[in-house]
Image (cartoon, rainbow, N blue to C red):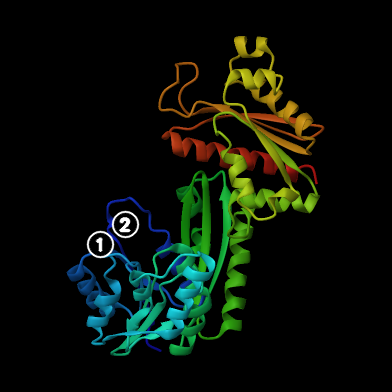
């Protein structure tokens, strides 16, 4: 079977100048991979006619499926639709179902009059297949040329995702014969990528050609992902599961989870399993740990709240850190975070707590307490553990590392108290 690949073109000057970060491409690539269509190339172009045209030519030589996002709005800089009309040799017509949908949005939902600029959103090239967009005014458009499929979608993420999930992803397996792709991912903590590679070299070398191993290091953790592709789905699952079990057994002392989930979700699942609750007392992370925990739907089942004690007076007045401790040991100290964690459990009436205090940089460090120094305490109703960490990066990464390590420190406490 001929290899099937997809390419992604994202359109918009805002992407090239860094005003907007492209989150569409990674999400689209992930979804395509799940249905057996690997992405071979991604490119971003500005709102320039010649650049877009050249990108369509170039990507159609690399892939059979070209997904395009952006440039479908009602303003003058949105040139994707007229360009596609000319590129595929069509003429613009009014799509009545789309016009009805756009009219409903403006006149019924928004209570605004329809102007000509809005009506033009319902115009499409006559040689495309219209993909209804229930989340916005710009429809998706599917074109075919020389055995290749081109699909244009809005760049607004929630509109693109709806079109992908309800229109594009169900349609592609009908248009192309796809291979099965299976992934298995585990996460390790406490061992570097190079040492991990040495440890599992024998397993990696024994993998068959259709199963690949990838190393994905990030913030003190290393994910290991096995990817297998083939035509026989049941055989593929059996093979990858066999090799995945061998991999897990080899790294068991560093294994955190055998799922592809972030640390805060691991904590959520452990808390739910125990029917336990958590609160946080955060200084240097400014509520970032709480933000991570509450980014998961249903977080109210296990997370009660956070005290962002950035100032010493908050530590002292609310978390009851003694004036003596702050004067003699300082805000960034074992004594301070221990008192923060203990009081947080009492105030929030939770089973567990996390407390952090540190120096994130770029300023504020000293010889005794350099930038990146962080004290973390985790507590249950019967035990408090504390640990000193020293990070060496910029402010943003130090905050992320603090959160990740604090959550992992809590994970170990929860695991030890089943």
**Residue 81 x/y as whole percent:** 30, 75
**Residue 138 x/y as whole percent:** 40, 72
Q: Residues within 10 Å of mark 2 (few under 14, many from 20)?
A: some
Could you say whether the residue bearing mark 1 is in a helix, strand or loop? loop
The answer to whether residue 218 is above or below residue 80 is: above
In which quadrant will I find the N terminus?
Answer: bottom left
Question: Number of marks in the image?
Answer: 2
Contact between labelled residues 1 and 2, with CB atoms less than 8 Å apart: yes
Quarter of the image where one finds residue 290 = top right
> Measuring 36% from the left and 53% from the top, which residue is drawn there?
20
**Residue 153 x/y as whole percent:** 39, 73
Q: Which residue is mark 2?
A: 15
Quarter of the image where one finds residue 121 = bottom left
> Measuring 60% from the left and 20% from the top, which residue is drawn there?
333
Q: Which residue is mark 1?
A: 46
Q: Residues within 10 Å of mark 1 (few under 14, many from 20)?
A: some
The circle drawn on residue 293 is none
Viewer-nearest residue: 31 or 406? 31
Viewer-nearest residue: 125 or 52? 125
């Amino acid at each position: 079977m001929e290899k099937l690949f997809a390419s992604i073109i994202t359109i918009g000057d805002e992407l090239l100048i860094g005003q907007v970060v492209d989150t569409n491409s990674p999400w689209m690539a992930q979804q395509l991979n799940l249905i057996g269509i690997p992405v071979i190339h991604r490119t971003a172009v500005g709102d320039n006619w010649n650049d877009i045209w050249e990108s369509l030519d170039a990507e159609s030589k690399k892939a059979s499926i070209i997904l395009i996002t952006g440039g479908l709005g009602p303003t003058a800089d949105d040139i994707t639709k007229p360009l596609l009309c000319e590129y595929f040799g069509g003429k613009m017509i009014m799509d009545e179902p789309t016009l009805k949908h756009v009219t409903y949005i403006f006149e019924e939902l928004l209570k605004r009059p329809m102007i000509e600029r809005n009506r033009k959103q319902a115009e499409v090239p006559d040689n495309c297949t219209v993909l209804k967009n229930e989340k916005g005014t710009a429809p998706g458009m599917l074109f075919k040329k020389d055995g290749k499929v081109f699909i244009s979608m809005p760049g607004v993420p929630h509109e693109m995702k709806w079109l992908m999930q309800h229109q594009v992803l169900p349609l592609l397996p009908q248009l192309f014969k796809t291979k099965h792709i299976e992934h298995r991912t585990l996460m390790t903590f406490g061992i570097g990528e190079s040492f991990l590679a040495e440890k599992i070299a024998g397993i990696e070398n024994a993998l068959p050609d259709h199963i690949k191993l990838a190393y994905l290091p990030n913030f003190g953790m290393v994910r290991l992902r096995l990817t297998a592709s083939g035509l026989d789905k049941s055989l593929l699952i059996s093979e990858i599961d066999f090799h995945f079990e061998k991999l897990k057994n080899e790294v068991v002392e560093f294994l955190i989870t055998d799922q592809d989930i972030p640390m805060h979700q691991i904590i959520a699942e452990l808390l739910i399993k125990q029917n336990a609750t958590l609160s946080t007392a955060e200084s240097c992370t400014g509520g970032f740990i709480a933000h991570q925990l509450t980014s998961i739907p249903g977080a109210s089942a296990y997370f009660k709240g956070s005290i962002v004690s950035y100032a010493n007076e908050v530590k002292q007045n609310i978390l009851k850190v003694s004036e003596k401790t702050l004067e003699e040991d300082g805000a960034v100290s074992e004594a301070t975070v221990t008192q923060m964690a203990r009081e947080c459990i009492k105030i929030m009436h939770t089973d567990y707590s996390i407390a952090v205090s540190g120096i994130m940089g770029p300023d504020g460090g000293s010889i005794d307490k350099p930038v990146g120094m962080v004290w973390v305490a985790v507590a249950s109703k019967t035990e408090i553990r504390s640990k000193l960490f020293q990070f060496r990066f910029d402010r943003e990464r130090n905050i992320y590392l603090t959160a990740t390590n604090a959550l992992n420190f809590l994970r170990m406490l929860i695991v030890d108290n089943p």
